[in-house]
């Protein structure tokens, strides 16, 4: 079985980061070790959330695992608690990233043109150092703009997205995937760029008229799990688009949905069936 380590926060309530990555990656048949960057009472879109920064745990955990000669097929990073944690995360890559360890970076820090409330303006430049180490970097458009210094736009064309993808690769990432891309009304999906081959890939599905917290983390987790299960990047991206849409679809059936993320649990059977038929 493939084994990955995921470095991101535990938001105790609110279905994001590790509370979605762990169940999804496990359901996909991949072992997921965790390195919590912080424990928060909820995600940071709630008011008055608590946060215990666990920066002082990252390197001791990494050193222990190194001593135990633990090997990882991938290291998947998400939400970090502070700009100061970036050094620890890069040191984690140095300690535990072997020749065959895929470094997969979701620079979870912003959406809809804005940084998340816990971060100051210095944060994106620090996150860019993590992105520079990535085999795959997987931001939304806001995050890609903040990483590359490009102005955020709601209206754009394919040239704007291609430029962002190229700039992400110029930062040092080998491959860039942009989520939440739409070139046509009613359609939403993904565009990726492989720096080694110069090839682009796009995939779209229906755009639902609703937006939920945590869907970026669900998307990244499915791509990570899919690639670990041997899917091509393109097939993993298709699965992630379709599964994330299904999660949103089942959630909007519930009139009380929500601050609590999407009901990804209800769509896990679909994820497992799709994975099985892709093998
Ligand atoms: O879904 C990204 C995310 C992860 N972790 C925390 C967050 C958010 C988004 O708001 O607040 C703590």
Image: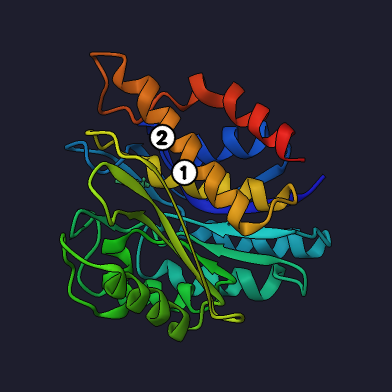
Residue 75 in the image: state x and y as whole percent: 63, 60
Residue 197 lies, in percent from the top left, at 61, 80
At horizontal 57% and vertical 57% (from top left) the residue drawn is 76
Say whether marks 1 and 2 touch (CB < 8 Å): yes
Secondary structure at numbered mark 2: helix
162 horizontally vs 76: left or right: left
Q: Secondary structure at mark 1?
A: helix
Q: Is residue 123 visible?
A: no
Residue sitting at 62 percent across and 58 percent down? 233
Q: Residue at x 72, y 66 (%)?
A: 101
Question: In the rendered image, which quarter is residue 126 located in?
Answer: bottom left
Image x and y of residue 14, in percent: 35, 31
- The answer to whether residue 178 is left or right of residue 185 is right
Where the C terminus falls, by quadrant? top right
Disc 2: which residue: 245
For label 1, the crowd category at 10 Å Cα-Cα, with few meaning under 14, some 14 to 19 and many 20 or more, is: many
List the single residue furthest toward the front: 184
Q: Which residue is mark 1?
A: 241
């Amino acid at each position: 079985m493939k084994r990955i380590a995921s470095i991101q926060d535990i938001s105790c309530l609110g279905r994001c980061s590790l509370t979605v990555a762990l169940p999804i990656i496990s359901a996909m048949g991949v072992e997921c070790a965790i390195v919590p960057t912080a424990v928060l009472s909820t995600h940071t879109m709630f008011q008055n959330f608590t946060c215990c920064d666990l920066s002082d745990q990252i390197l001791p955990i990494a050193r222990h695992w190194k001593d135990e000669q633990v090997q990882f097929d991938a290291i998947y990073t998400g939400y970090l608690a502070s700009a100061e944690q970036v050094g620890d995360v890069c040191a984690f890559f140095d300690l535990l990233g072997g020749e065959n360890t895929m470094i997969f970076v979701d620079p979870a820090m912003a959406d809809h043109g804005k940084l998340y409330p816990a971060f100051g303006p210095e944060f994106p430049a620090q996150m860019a150092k993590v992105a520079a180490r990535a085999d795959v970097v997987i931001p939304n458009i806001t995050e890609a703009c903040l990483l590359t210094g490009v102005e955020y736009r709601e209206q754009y064309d394919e040239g704007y997205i291609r430029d962002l993808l190229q700039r992400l690769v110029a930062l040092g990432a080998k491959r860039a995937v942009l989520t939440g891309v739409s070139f046509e009304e009613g359609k939403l999906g993904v565009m990726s760029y492989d720096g080694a081959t110069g090839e682009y890939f796009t995939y779209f599905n229906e755009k639902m008229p609703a937006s939920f917290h945590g869907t970026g983390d669900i998307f990244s987790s499915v791509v990570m799990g899919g690639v670990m299960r041997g899917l091509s990047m393109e097939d993993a991206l298709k699965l992630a688009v379709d599964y994330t849409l299904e999660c949103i679809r089942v959630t909007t059936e519930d009139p009380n949905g929500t601050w609590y993320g999407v009901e990804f649990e209800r769509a896990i059977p679909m994820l497992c069936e799709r994975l099985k038929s892709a093998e």
